[in-house]
Image: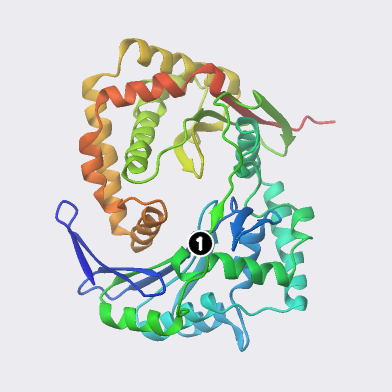
Amino acid sequence: MLELNYPRIGETVLQHTLPNGLRICIVPKPGYCKKYAFFATRYGGMDMKFNWGGTWYDTPAGIAHYLEHKMFDTEDGNALLELSQNGAEPNAFTGNAMTAYYFDCTEHFEENLRLLLSFVSVPYFTDESVEKERGIIAQEIRMVEDTPDWQVYERLLECLYRTSPARVPIAGTVESIAEITAETLYACHKAFYDPKNMMLCVVGDVRAEDVIAIAGELTPESHGDILERDYGSDEELSAAKKESRSVMEVNMPQFLVGWKCRAGSEGDALLRESLIGEMACDILLGDSSPLYHRLYDQGLINGSFGGGFDQLPGIAYLYAGGESSQPEAVSAAIMDEAERLSREGVDEDFYRQIRRSSLGASLRELNSFENIAVSLADGYFRNFDAFRFPEAYDSITRADIEQFLRENVVEVRRAISIIEPKKEG
């Protein structure tokens, strides 16, 4: 077992890799009553095309999410119900690049951990149960299609990208999930729910040796073939389409404007690039920026306005949006401010303020056991140490922020998605 100490953030991680390839990370929290377990696989909505065992597979959109729904089924009943009856609070999620199952509890931790590792490692479903779930997921998809927040986001990605699977909703479509069978679910589980493609993170006052022993007992003895993933061809950095307009039941226009950024590297550089993107977004349009206050005073934005920077497999983008009576005017103002900052430079005092604020927010996230586990898993899957973020902040300069804005927030990379209110009659 390897002990990693992080004195700048006051954390310690006990790290161990089982012979089957499963990485285990334990973050000790002496004296805490709550214990948290997070079991994740590097498999998400974007992993539709892959090479496994020398054969290429092209699977239906939404299969990772569908599999997450079915994983709680067991031969004896439902693992979600068992965990809840045992005093745990369980849940799961499917993202673009990760699926995770987790719980927190204050007692019966080892028993709950056994349940978690068992149902995730050994799937159980029938043709009948898969067919029954199809209707439930179809209903969920239709709800998303009627949700403006989701639609404005999905349509922005369709504008930005030509071939990236990020264009496709994580849950798929009603048509795509119609192709999913029990056989395809079992095959994808075998390919992606492989111990070498997974990570177990436990946070709390636990004995590391006991966690490792339980994981060794309940996960497969060995790992399978290494996966090769296909996220589409490399795209040029211009937006695929300049805008998307649609009409829904909203009180005022909703919009999301985005800029296609160069895809991040792997490893420590990815963490650094992510922090640069987030800080650049805060400096450009965050709620303490001059632009934000100017737009707010002009009545062009309200409290719903915000933005961020995201990096997914093979792509990266900066975005901002909310409600506005004049979405195009807000988008143009962001462009003008980016050009001004590129031309005149970022104010040094404001840069330092944003860096302190961003570092403080990262430190506060360590108060959440869930945030700790998600960040460690994300770092492991993308080959960087998530707890080295203070050192990454140290390496970032004002010039890095200015270069990011100069290269990425440019007209050719911009697209906008707008949802307008339905007109009476």
Q: Residue at x 59, y 50 (%)?
A: 46
Q: Residue at x 78, y 29 (%)?
A: 423
Element assignment for label 1: loop
Q: Residue at x 54, y 26 (%)?
A: 237
**Quadrant into which the N terminus falls:** bottom left
Task: Residue 405: name its quadrant.
Answer: top left
Left or right position of 166 against 408 = right
Q: Residues within 10 Å of mark 1 (few under 14, many from 20)?
A: some
Q: Nearer the viewer, residue 271 or 364?
A: 271
Q: Residue furthest right?
A: 425
- The image position of residue 249, as x and y in percent, is 72, 39
Left or right position of 346 against 256 = left
Q: In the displayed structure, would residue 48 be above or below residue 234?
A: below
- The image position of residue 254, as x and y in percent, is 61, 33
Q: In the displayed structure, would residue 265 be above or below residue 290?
A: below
Residue 108 seen in the figure? no
Q: Residue furthest bottom?
A: 76
- The image position of residue 29, as x and y in percent, is 23, 70
- The image position of residue 6, as x and y in percent, is 18, 56
Q: Nearer the viewer, residue 416 or 414?
A: 414
